[in-house]
Amino acid sequence: MPDAIFAHPRLAAVYDAFDGHRDDLDLYLGLADELAASMVLDVGCGTGSLAVRLAAGGRTVVAVDPAKASLEAARLKDGAAEVRWIHGDATALPALSADLAVMTGNVAQVFLTDESWEQSLLGIGAALRPGGHLVFETRRPEYRAWQEWAAGTGPVTLDVPGVGAVEQRRAVTQVNLPFVSFRYTYRFADGAIVTSDSTLRFRDREEVESSLAACGYRVLEVRDAPDRPGREFVFIAEHLAFRAVNHSPQDTDNSACAERQRCG
């Protein structure tokens, strides 16, 4: 199941307010132009911030997410009618022949098992045309972002339009590399408290590149995230061919759930 931060209706409704101005999305809009992508698949689209901007540029956009509450928030955005929204995950996508698939906001880190990660890569590949591209970011383990998260535990309070004052607190609950767990706690003006627990997997560059190759991709380039220099890898890969990989059943609790909120 998706984390509460995406799936709980009250948290999905305030997600964009706490996520702030999405400077990170400019990179993906630029790459869509650079790769001349006319059809884009947004995997783990969340509340649809990138999808609606891609569609506003005249592209055909398909956006998928397993969190129904996030999709409901996305459908309220201006331009949402131009996007095809799919409630589901990357393992059950239709054959789209998309030019480009993207995973923003470190979605790649929510796949905790090798099986769930590889099954999602295969599902995305099946939705791409031969020669289509996959672009995503993932935090560099050596940067040790969780240390910043642990240090920055002070509350953040925002006055969210239509909701009122909402307080957010973050706490790192466990570091057992390559896994890092943390909890968000939200306090609403009516006194309600809602928590959301998340776990991310930190893969190094070699591990990511190996998994891409095993699933039929060729890494073309690994860039730095321009708004977060030295903190994240941005992988640009070309899909060569669908390649079957035998696995045990995937960890459905973590499939295609989107950890879009940048903690640092």
Image (cartoon, rainbow, N blue to C red):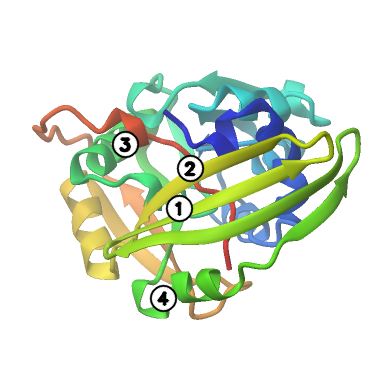
Q: Earlier in the sequence, mark 3 or mark 2?
A: 2
Decide if residue 57 is in sight here: no
Residue drawn at x 34%, y 51% is: 238
Q: Which quadrant is home to the C terminus?
A: bottom right
Q: CA distance from mark 3 to mark 2?
A: 15 Å
In the image, 262 versus 162, the foreground residue is 162
Q: Which quadrant is home to the N terminus?
A: top left
Left or right of 107 in this view: 159: right
Marks 1 and 4 in Cβ contact (< 8 Å): no
Secondary structure type for disc 4 = loop
Residue at which label 2 appears: 100
Choose mark 3 or mark 2, whichever is in front. 3
Residue at which label 3 appears: 120
Residue drawn at x 41%, y 47% is: 133
Q: Please state which amino acid type lies under the numbered disc 4.
A: Arg
* Number of other residues with Cα within 10 Å of mark 4, as a class: few under 14, some 14 to 19, many 20 or more: few
* Number of other residues with Cα within 10 Å of mark 2, as a class: few under 14, some 14 to 19, many 20 or more: many
Marks 1 and 2 in Cβ contact (< 8 Å): yes
In the image, 19 versus 62, the foreground residue is 19
Residue at which label 1 appears: 135
Q: Please state which amino acid type lies under the numbered disc 2.
A: Leu
Q: Which mark is residue 144?
A: 4
Q: Earlier in the sequence, mark 2 or mark 4?
A: 2
